[in-house]
Amino acid sequence: MAGELLYSVDGATATAAQRISLADAGLLERRHLQQWVVEHPELIGDGVKIVAFEYGRWIAGAATPTADRLDVLGVDRTGRLVVVELKRDRAPDSVTTQAINYAAMVHRFSLDTLADVHADHLGADTTPDEARSRLMEWAETISDETLRPPRVVLMAAEFGPVVTNTTLFLRRSASTSAWSATSSTAPRQVSRCCPWRSCCQSRSWTSS
């Protein structure tokens, strides 16, 4: 990782850690990476509550169910939705399109819909009213209006030039459309690209 040193320390002995990929470490996207995010939502950003993960109850045109599954859905302290797309390895060039599609679908959510989704996530006979109360405890001003536009977070081992260029394009197009973005190629640093002025953060993973 650029600018950072990581050592394994045993008493007076410090050994430089070797960087490996999550795949080389035998770690899986859903079983491990996704679970880390669910258990430690601060990885997404400050002040994010997990609403659901592996959400796939979408209805397309003509009431047709789709097979798409959103990795993680959260909500921040302002009541804004957070869409998280995870990739264990290098993010494919299509990841921005995939994330924007999810953002477009949750953009239609109402607070009642979100309460239903969160109730399913909580399980244990949690009612939508109880789930709604928990959401309102987290974000006091949450409403149909605060949910939109959703913020998008991309998390992957690395991002190629197509993803970076798309992010930069969205930033530069902000004056003529509803998009804005910034970009960084350094691991674990944040690049932001935002549909409907929402922030899309790209974060890189490393393992040792």
Image (cartoon, helix red, strand yellow):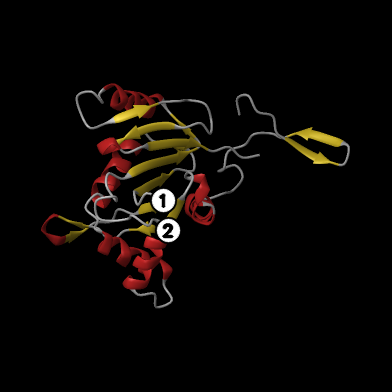
Quarter of the picture containing the N terminus is top right
Asked if residue 91 can be seen in this view, the reply is no
Q: Residue at x 53, y 56 (%)?
A: 39
Question: Could you give the CA–CA distance between mark 1 and mark 2, rounded to whole angstroms?
Answer: 6 Å
Look at label 1 and name its amino acid: Arg
Q: Does 142 sit above or below residue 169?
A: below
Q: Which residue is mark 2?
A: 138
- Looking at the rendered structure, the number of numbered marks drawn on it comes to 2
Residue farthest to the right, as pictured: 12
Q: Residue at x 51, y 45 (%)?
A: 43
Of the image marks 1 and 2, the number of the one nearer the N terminus: 1
Q: Residue at x 69, y 29 (%)?
A: 5
Q: Which residue is mark 1?
A: 77
- Taking 175 as reference, is 72 left or right? right
Marks 1/2 in contact by CB < 8 Å: the verdict is yes
Q: Residues within 10 Å of mark 2 (few under 14, many from 20)?
A: some
